[in-house]
Image: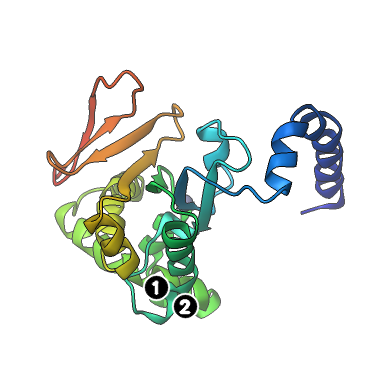
Amino acid sequence: MGKQSVHKLVVGHESFKRDYFSSEAALFATLAGGVHEPKALVISCCDARVVPDVILQAEPGDLFVVRNIAALVPPYGKGHHRAVGAAIEYAILGLKVRHLIVCGHTQCGGLRALADGPVRLAAHMPSLAEWLADADQLYHQIRTHMKDAGDDELVAHLAYESVPVQLENLLSYPAVRWALERDRIELHGWVYDLNDGALKAYEPVNNVFVELDATGRPTIEFSLGEGP
Ligand SMILES: [Zn+2]
């Protein structure tokens, strides 16, 4: 980031403090007073274009967010699960959030990196290669089903196919199973579409994604398990 960009951020912060922070003084005083009662844990990608608080028009204090490359949930018990696992456990047992949301997105650079192959990645980005290794199996499954697909089509498909896998991985966490058995949490799998700003939600019963609609009218947008 160049000097000019940093300056832009500082100007932005000054604007935040002067305008937003002062106009929402009551909210920020409540938060500073110790109230931390987020409505949801959101596990989303680091991608700068996919900002959960903006997409959901949430206020400070609403969302407990953990972001990582490609919005992955590593299976419990592997060494690299800890950052996500710590957020999951604290969200459920400490903050008592009701909703756990895995939010992937289209045009995901992390998922695209799988196409390069972990071995090639490992040469210059070993941490990234190790992190993406969990998703590599899924990539190869889809690659096998979509032999003739180009990388763009494959990555688009992978964005949707990945979400149910991450939801399944959530179930490997004892805290998640404990809370589900007591009906204390609900799991949600969403994909944010960069093209139109829509959120599509996974419906496990029918194995489809439907666009989120506050009126509750489902519109099937994407079916899983379909070859090209
Ligand atoms: Zn991404």
Q: Quadrant of the N terminus?
A: bottom right
Crowdedness near tag 2: few (<14), some (14–19) or many (≥20) residues, C-alpha within 10 Å: few
Q: Which residue is mark 2?
A: 122
SS category of the residue bearing label 2:
helix
Is residue 173 visible to the viewer in this orientation of the structure? no
Would you say 169 lies left or right of 97 here?
left
Numbered circle sitting on residue 134: none
Q: Residues within 10 Å of mark 1 (few under 14, many from 20)?
A: some
Q: Mark 1 is on which residue type?
A: Pro
Q: Residue at x 51, y 34 (%)?
A: 55
Residue 9 placement, left or right of 189: right
The CB of the residue at mark 2 lies under 8 Å from ligand 1: no
Q: How many marks?
A: 2
- The x and y percentages for residue 108 are 44, 49
* Ligand 1 lies under 8 Å from the Cβ of mark 1: no
Disc 1: which residue: 118
Residues at circles 1 and 2 in contact by the CB criterion of under 8 Å: yes
Placement of the C terminus among the 4 image quadrants: top left
2, 130: nearer the viewer: 130
x, y percentage for residue 64? 53, 50
- Secondary element at tag 1: helix
**Amino acid type, callout 2:** Ala
